[in-house]
Image (tube, rainbow, N blue to C red):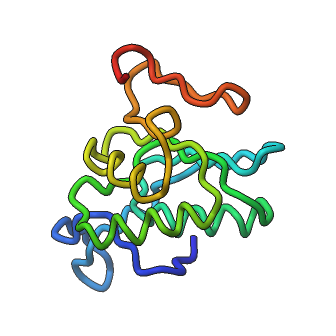
Amino acid sequence: MPRRYPERNWNPAIQIVTAGGLVADSVPEDMSLVIRTDKGLVVVTGCGHAGVVNTVEYAREIAGPGPVYAVIGGLHLFAAKDETLAWTAEKLHAAGLVDLLGAHCTGIETVFRIRQLAGLTRKTAVVGAVGASFDSDRGIDPLALAQ
């Protein structure tokens, strides 16, 4: 996936051996799923090492322009600085984000900050929990555990 923005959401201290020597493990095998719906794109991320904004932009390139209705999965932003979260929230808001279900490596505080900065609500941006679900008609169902 081409990286339009300099997002780097992996630990550069972790290295792999290549023919050219040790290099940072950029986790190129991290994947996402893009679903085109009547409301816009739904992007389901793995761990978001390429950066959620890069992933969203690439999804729009391959699945067609239009709003990104939902982002579901790991964003790997649990240790991100406030400036990074503000930039990410701005880009997701500009992409048309309506629902965010941030899971595992996203971080609880990160979900709350993006929710606030992107103008989302407690019903449209939640921390993912086991059994939580998303339906394009009904939105997010975080279950009682995450409410």
Residue 89 position in % (x across, y down): 45, 62
Image side of residue 49 versus residue 11, left or right: right
Is 64 situated above or below 19? above
Residue 114 position in % (x across, y down): 39, 54
Residue at 21 percent across and 58 percent down: it is: 79
**Residue 126: which quarter of the image?**
top left
Image side of residue 94 versus residue 123, left or right: right
Residue at 35 percent across and 23 percent down: it is: 146
The mark total stands at: 0
Residue 147 position in % (x across, y down): 37, 22
Image side of residue 67 versus residue 92, left or right: right
Residue at 22 percent across and 71 percent down: it is: 12
Taking the view exactly as shown, the residue that stands out farthest to the left is 13
User: Closer to the camera, 80 or 62?
Assistant: 80
Taking the view exactly as shown, the residue that stands out farthest to the right is 38
Residue 26 position in % (x across, y down): 35, 68
**Residue 22: which quarter of the image?**
bottom left
Residue at 25 percent across and 63 percent down: it is: 80
Quarter of the image that includes the N terminus: bottom right
